Amino acid sequence: MRKSYSLPLVVFGLCLLEGWVIYLNLVVHPDNQPALTLVIAILFAIAAGIGMWYRTRVLNTPVS
């Protein structure tokens, strides 16, 4: 039996992680905003999309 992942929980977890990274960016580099925030958001969206594609298409893991 394969383990199924809840898509809303995965999205919620990714949003929390991205929010934490953006918050840390604001604390560490307050003078380079909003350029770094935009770069972080774009890179995180690309990485999350590739990760979900890999999990659903390559590993064939069901996401419900």
Image (cartoon, grey):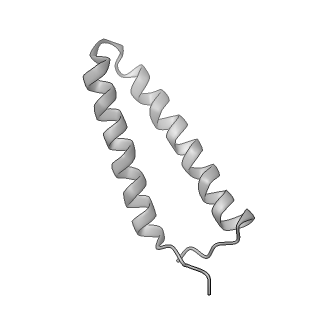
> In the figure, residue 36 lies in which quadrant?
top left
Residue 17 in the image, given as x and y percentages of width and height: 37, 47
Residue 43 in the image, given as x and y percentages of width and height: 54, 36
Q: Is residue 64 left or right of residue 56?
A: left
Residue at figure coordinates x 31%, y 41% from the top left: 20
Residue 63 in the image, given as x and y percentages of width and height: 56, 73
Q: Is residue 13 left or right of residue 4?
A: left
Q: Where is the N terminus found, in terms of image quarters? A: bottom right
Q: Is residue 15 left or right of residue 31?
A: right
> In the figure, residue 52 lies in which quadrant?
bottom right
- Nearer to us in this view, 43 or 55: 55
Task: Indicate whether 9 appears above or below 24.
Answer: below
Residue 59 in the image, given as x and y percentages of width and height: 70, 67
Residue at figure coordinates x 30%, y 30% from the top left: 24
Residue at figure coordinates x 61%, y 53% from the top left: 51
Q: Is residue 44 left or right of residue 14?
A: right
Task: Indicate whether 52 appears above or below 59.
Answer: above
